[in-house]
Amino acid sequence: MPTVIAATSLLVAGSMLAACGGSGNGAVISRTGLVTGVLELNGGNPRNAPMPVSGRVCLSRRGTTRCTAVGSTGHFTLYLPPGTWAVRGSSPHYIINGKAASCLASDIKVLAGYAGTNVVVNCSVL
């Protein structure tokens, strides 16, 4: 009898893992698209070279907004459902007239299962 109980326990555990989608990120990528990008401060430095900055990036579509914190490297990654998304960012390093200002990027189109949408969110200093 102990052998039957052990075998049943293994079958139940295996079924639970399968039901949870134990396939890792493959399941996430197939229903969503991977968006990578960088938040940059442009201008305002001696060479006017883009400089990555920390802050926050938000993408919005049809009443849904997804935001992510951005570290000092300026790089970020998000998994998003397919569609066209508006992109906005902000950084504590980007202040105009004493107030936080928006950093902009062109809208992006996210495709399900596609892991290659790249965006530059630009904080322009003129």
Image (cartoon, rainbow, N blue to C red):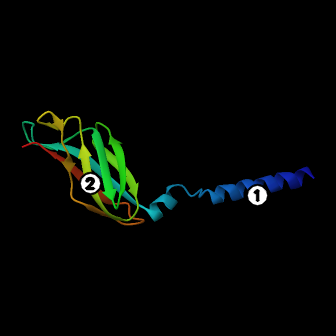
Q: 3 left or right of 104?
A: right
Q: Quadrant of residue 52?
A: top left
Give the residue pinned by disc 1.
11
Q: Earlier in the sequence, mark 1 or mark 2?
A: 1
* Amino acid marked by disc 1: Leu
Mark 1–mark 2 Cα distance, whole angstroms, equals 46 Å
Name the residue rendered at 23%, 52% in the picture.
Answer: 120
Name the residue rendered at 24%, 60% in the picture.
Answer: 107
Q: Residues within 10 Å of mark 1 (few under 14, many from 20)?
A: few
The front one of 2 and 55 is 55
Circle 2: element type: strand
The front one of 114 and 104 is 104
Q: Quadrant of residue 24?
A: bottom right
Mark 1 or mark 2, whichever is nearer to me: 2
The front one of 12 and 90 is 90
* Amino acid marked by disc 2: Val
Q: 17 left or right of 76?
A: right
Give the residue pinned by disc 2.
87
Quarter of the image with the C terminus is top left
Q: 124 left or right of 68?
A: left
Image location of residue 9, percent across then percent down: 79, 52
- Would you place residue 123 above or below residue 87 in this image? above
Name the residue rendered at 51%, 61% in the picture.
Answer: 27
The front one of 81 and 43 is 81
Image location of residue 106, percent across then percent down: 21, 58
Q: 85 left or right of 26?
A: left
Image location of residue 59, percent across then percent down: 31, 54
Q: Check residue 33 in the rendering and tell me which mark sits there, or answer none.
A: none
Image location of residue 104, percent across then percent down: 20, 51
Q: Residues within 10 Å of mark 2 (few under 14, many from 20)?
A: many
